[in-house]
Amino acid sequence: MNPSVKKLGLSANKNIRTIIGLMSGTSLDGLDIALCKIQGAGENTEVELSEFITKEYDARQKSRLKSISSVENVELKELCYQHTWLASVHAGMINEALTEWGINPVEVDCIASHGQTIYHLPGRDQTDTPQPLNSTLQIADGDQIAVNTGIVTISDFRQKHTAHGGEGAPMAALVDRLLFGHETESRILLNIGGIANFTWLPAGKQSHEKSFTTDTGPGNTLIDNVVQNYFNEPFDKDGKIASSGNVHVELLNLLSGDSWFNEKHSKSTGPEYFNVGWIERLTKNAGMNLKEVKPEDLVATVTELSAKTIAQSINANVKSPEDSPIYASGGGARNPILMNRLKEILGQTELHDFSKLGLDPDAKEAVIFAVLANEMLAGEGFEFNSGAEIKRINFGKISFPE
């Protein structure tokens, strides 16, 4: 037997596996690194977050990634280079973190690398092709990470999702029920990253009611875009710019009237769809002069748009949402203007910080990918509804360091 495969088998048969989960989101802040101790698999999965850190990208790294992220035209040479370069950056960050934690790489069973999404393209957005196919692309080569850390790396998780007819996102629901389902409490797990998404978990881990997950539309992406374009700031810290402006009602109605928001089934999106160009197109087509909208009013309006469309999606897709408390994570959960408006719009629905469930909200997505990797090693796969049948599938590609 190949020694690497044999070693992988030994890891799979351990009572407790040590797995590093990685996540780098569309905000390009940096790499989240979660060191997890995982016992069991499937419904018996138990996770302990041993260590967590975010290694921030420096200005040069962030600028380089931004040049190829969510843009239609890039130089193939640059894309090719960054696929390798980013993996070496991530490997260096992992090695730094392990040194800081006093952990020897041989103690780690595997790395679960999400990579960096540089383009997300659901079939519904493909109007210029005769054969729409759900497509998504993440960079940071798994072999490079494995070789440069000496640790088996599982990566490229989203491709199996699209291969079976999914959109490659959101994937959190696959793990959410395992870790956060409750016997008596129905829950809504809301993540407000660049794009906002939620998972509804009906009470009872074996509930006959299936959990539901979807992207709701823009979370922070439009707020960040507008603030960067008009104020030369990376984001609206504490919602201060939004609080200084007024919601432009006509513009809000125009933006929220986009047909994307009316689709009630599970769906995904990205900054490729929701960006400043989207605002400019809609206003131009409506004969509205965007230049007449004060910049602070524009920030207030897109903040209100995020709150309104998140609430709209929850109300449309969750049975009796007032009976399902919300546990919020992501950068948007730290925006008091956004969160206060969400509370006001949702009314009786309780809104909590995700930390109330016993996990650092900043670590949640990295932990999710660690669990996806654990299932690949030791589980029977996740239940996946392809539309035609329910299958059990595993996610990720395995790279050995040897």
Image (cartoon, rainbow, N blue to C red):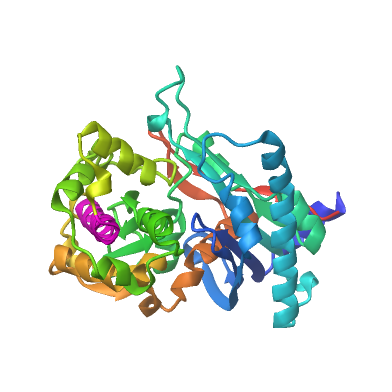
Residue interval drawn in magenta = 294-314
Residue 176 location in percent, x, y?
A: 42, 61
Depth order, front residue of 268/266: 268
The image shows residue 210, relative to residue 73, as above or below, that is below
Please tell me whether residue 125 belongs to the stretch shown in magenta: no
Whether residue 72 sits left or right of residue 1 in the image: it is left
Depth order, front residue of 395/20: 20
Can residue 182 be seen here? The reply is no
Can residue 234 be seen here? The reply is yes
Q: Would you identify the image quadrant in which residue 93 lies? A: bottom right
Depth order, front residue of 112/124: 124
Q: Would you identify the image quadrant in which residue 264 lies? A: top left
Whether residue 118 sits left or right of residue 212 in the image: it is right
Residue at image position (45%, 38%) is 166
Q: Would you identify the image quadrant in which residue 297 lies? A: bottom left
Please tell me whether residue 311 belongs to the stretch shown in magenta: yes
Magenta residues, dominant SS class: helix
Residue 258 location in percent, x, y?
A: 24, 39
